[in-house]
Image (tube, helix red, strand yellow):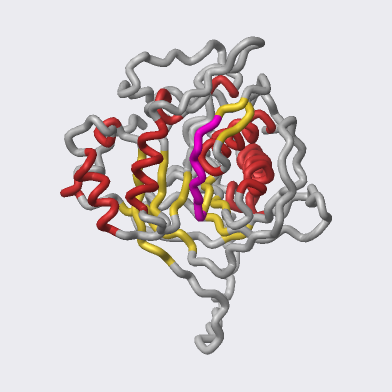
Amino acid sequence: MTTIDPVAPPATVQVNWEETIGTSRTTLTTHLWTAPPLRRESPIHDKAFDALRELRVDFARFLPWFSHPRVAVAELAPPTATETSWNFELLDPFVEDFVAASEGRPIVANFATIPTWMFVTPEPVAIAEDPDEIHWHYEQGSELRDPTCGEVADYFYRLASWYIAGGFTDELGRRHESGHRYRFAYWEVLCEPDIGHRLSPETYTKLYDAVVARLAPLDPDMKFVGLSLSHVHHQPNTSGTFSIPPTTPTASGSTRSPITSMLNPRSPIPSVQQETRPVNTGATSSTPKPTPSSTRSASSTPSVGAWLPIPRHSSTNWAPTRPT
């Protein structure tokens, strides 16, 4: 005999159109990544960056992508007892030209590629000498060799210091001077962490807190962007995990300011997910850092919207197809 469950009564939804709960604000902008056709020796370089300049957009996003690690990764090999591999020779021209084309408008930094040697892998990942050669399989490993995320945070601190603070001191105590003093409105922590290394929600959230704690003192006005998920969504609970406030108190014991975060804007329909994530400035690190002079809040600034490609006529939307 078959038992039929009773049908649940219909739910009633009441909408109060007179009450404003929240306001979603989207800024249409663009995205530029370190593609070989945008190198200075390329015949389309000048036209591409002129097109970016003529757009006059706020929050243009700069992304050195993992597909070209010799450009995107500033430290391709782990430090030894006698030397480090820090090298900005190929990356600097992209950053310099991007900042120049932005003409002082607010920009977003997304140096999203973690050196693969910081992950546990069966063997080192081979990298071709040709900087223009594509490495779709550069991002290998899901387990960081330093589970505290301190090594990754220190890498991004030194990279950010190169562009924000004029230079940094490497793992061997040697000073590297850049002369750069750029300002970034936002620093985006990784791009599509749910693919590539396929970081778990817990690992990404821990890494985000560690990176923000290290970078926040460099510029008290710089805000941070989190998640930036792909459209694949291997871990549907990432957003929920990221939204849980961390338990580590700040150095001063005060409440941390909320930070605007977003989903990856390469979705079919441009959208913004407005969430909050407190800043963790209580993490420790082997590299001394100054005390933040103030707290930051993104509550009064517009959320960064979809990264729209630069118009096709500018030839800057070149991108090889990524294998699935």
Q: Can residue 320 be seen in this view?
A: no
Q: Which residue is drawn at 41% across and 49% down?
A: 61
Residue 291 lies left or right of residue 145; in this view the side is right
Instruction: Answer above or below: position of 63 versus 126.
Output: below
Q: Which residue is drawn at 67% across and 48% down?
A: 217
Q: Could you tell me residue 171's position as x and y percent?
A: 65, 23
Instruction: Answer above or below: position of 145 versus 259.
Output: above
Identify which residue, 303 or 17, lies in the foreground.
303
Q: Could you tell me residue 59's position as x and y percent?
A: 42, 56
Does the magenta stretch mainly form a helix, a strand or a loop? loop
Q: In which quarter of the image is the C terminus?
A: top left
Instruction: Answer above or below: position of 143 versus 316.
Output: above
Q: Quadrant of the N terminus?
A: bottom right
Q: Residue at x 58, y 71 (%)?
A: 8
Q: Can residue 292 be seen in this view?
A: yes
Q: Residue 67 is drawn in which quadrant?
A: top left
Residue at the limit of the structure toward the right, as seen here? 253
Q: Could you tell me residue 195's position as x and y percent?
A: 48, 35
Residue 117 lies left or right of residue 243; in this view the side is left
Whether residue 204 appears in magenta in the rendering, the answer is no
Q: Could you tell me residue 280's position as x and y percent?
A: 71, 49
Q: Residue 64 is drawn in which quadrant?
A: top left
Instruction: Answer above or below: position of 11 versus 178.
Output: below
The magenta region covers 177-185
Q: Residue at x 52, y 13 (%)?
A: 124
